[in-house]
Image (cartoon, rainbow, N blue to C red):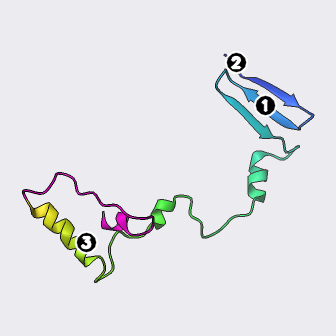
Amino acid sequence: MEPRVQNDNRHNEIITISGPARVHVGDQYGSASLNEVLRSLPTAKSAPFYSNQRRHKPTCLPGTRADLLQEIYDWADSETSPAIFWLSGLAGTGKSTIA
C-alpha cells in the first residue's frame, strides 16, 4: 500500500498514513530542513547519547553491604540452598550493584 501524505493547512501539519496501523503526524517548519531544526535545539554537552557508557561500575564500596554479600556467598556455596536467591529492595538501594 502506498503511503498517503496529506498537508492539513488548518494545523500546519503533515499527516502520513501508511496503512491502518501506522500514522505519522509531524509539524512543518516552512523551508527549514530537518537538520537545521535539529541543529537549532539546545544541547546538554554532558548528556551522552549512549548513557550506558557512563553507568556506574558495579562494585560495592569497601565495608558496605558486607552482611548481605556474605549471605549471598554462603547461599552460592551451599549444596542445600534453594535454586533462586531473591534480592529485593527499593529503587536506588544497590540491587544492581550487588548483582
| Residue depicted at 78% across the width and 31% down the height | 15
Q: Earlier in the sequence, mark 3 or mark 1?
A: 1
Q: Earlier in the sequence, mark 2 or mark 1?
A: 2
**What residue did someone put label 1 on?**
15
Q: Nearer the viewer, mark 2 or mark 1?
A: 1
| Residue depicted at 47% across the width and 67% down the height | 54
| Residue depicted at 35% across the width and 67% down the height | 97
**Amino acid marked by disc 2:** Glu
**Amino acid marked by disc 3:** Leu
Q: Give the dominant element type of the magenta stretch: helix, strand or loop.
A: loop
Mark 1, other Cα within 10 Å: few <14 / some 14–19 / many ≥20: some
| Residue depicted at 64% across the width and 25% down the height | 21
Q: Is residue 29 magenta?
A: no
Instruction: Write the start and end of the magenta stretch as one range.
Output: 79-99
Picture quarter with the N terminus: top right
**Amino acid marked by disc 1:** Ile
**What residue did someone put label 3 on?**
68
Say which element carries label 1.
Answer: strand
Q: Residue 2: which disc? A: 2
Check contact, mark 3 vs mark 1: CB within 8 A.
no
Q: CA distance from mark 3 to mark 1?
A: 56 Å
